[in-house]
Image (tube, rainbow, N blue to C red):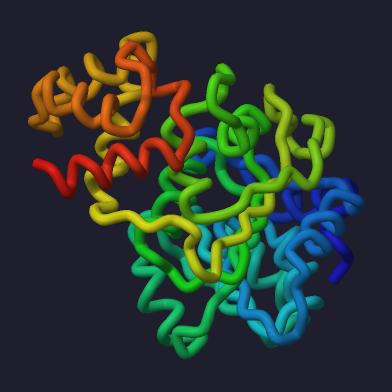
Amino acid sequence: MDKLGIPKNTIDILNKYGFVFQKKYGQNFLIDTHVLEKIINAAEISKEDFVLEIGPGIGTLTQYLCESAGRVVAVEIDKNLIPILNETLAPYDNVTIINEDILKVDIASLVRDFNDNKPIKVVANLPYYITTPIIMNLFENHIPLSGVTVMIQKEVADRIKAVPGSKDYGALSLAVQYYAKPYIVANVPPNCFLPRPKVGSAVINLIPYDNSPYQVKDESLLFALIRASFNQRRKTFINSVTNYEGLTFDKNTITEALDALGLPRDIRGEALTLEQFIAISNYLSANS
């Protein structure tokens, strides 16, 4: 099978099957071999690795993964792509194609069944419309991960990597940075895809912590405080938290927490570091 990273080969296979792009699935197929090689190199894939690919499309990245990894499981939602995948991946005996919606797949049991519960690598050109739920699903469900290397919208990559006080900093930045260290590998322009997306993309590497540097008494409280802060990001932290439906703290309790930790009473959530959010969360856990 010819390599699909070459535009002509991609167009030929799409024409052969009369494939029609589905906007609802956010389908943009990579047609740049340099970008594909960057993804494989960034993920540091070896024959020891089990790789989960989300949204393989016509199998462009999958071909590269099959050549580098020990085993690949590719989860594709669009049933119209399955016959194409069966052809483009026919030369490889180390790949399994699953026709499912990744958000409905029990990834934990998939890892148990296919990889004996050992850590996996997730590598994907992610559909932009479900990027955040996919990434959070992997981390919040504590899937055993040794790495996540994904192509996502550049704007989302910037948000994941953002620091306190910047316009991109928000709940997603804090949530991902709690679980992993983010690193932007490459920015990818729209002309590397078919069809061309309207926005730029980026390959981001998320390296999960082996041992978390953070000690948190109550993870669900921590994330509720983070969500509350960015729900109304122009408000002070005190007002955001006391107005948030999912929390029941009064102003005095939150003020006490900030005072005890030496933080200004008028501070906004967007100015707080992850460590400060954790300190507030732990204080409230211990004192309320």
* Whether residue 202 is situated above or below residue 228 in the rendered picture: below
Q: Nearer the viewer, residue 156 or 92?
A: 156
Q: Is residue 123 left or right of residue 276?
A: right
Q: Nearer the viewer, residue 253 or 179?
A: 253
Where is residue 271? Give x, y as percent.
47, 22
Where is residue 237? Give x, y as percent.
30, 20
Q: Residue furthest bottom?
A: 116
Q: Is residue 266 left or right of residue 154?
A: left
* Whether residue 97 is situated above or below residue 39 in the rendered picture: below
Residue drawn 84% across the image and 55% down it: 38
Q: Is residue 127 left or right of residue 66?
A: left
Residue drawn 51% across the image and 64% down it: 75
- Is residue 102 visible in the rendered structure shown here? no
**Could you say which quadrant of the image residue 22 lies in?**
top right
Q: How many marks?
A: 0
- Is residue 230 visible in the rendered structure shown here? yes
Where is residue 270? Give x, y as percent.
45, 22
Residue drawn 50% across the image and 59% down it: 213
Residue drawn 62% across the image and 54% down it: 206
Q: Quadrant of the N terminus?
A: bottom right
Q: Nearer the viewer, residue 83 or 43?
A: 43
* Whether residue 246 is situated above or below residue 35 in the rendered picture: above
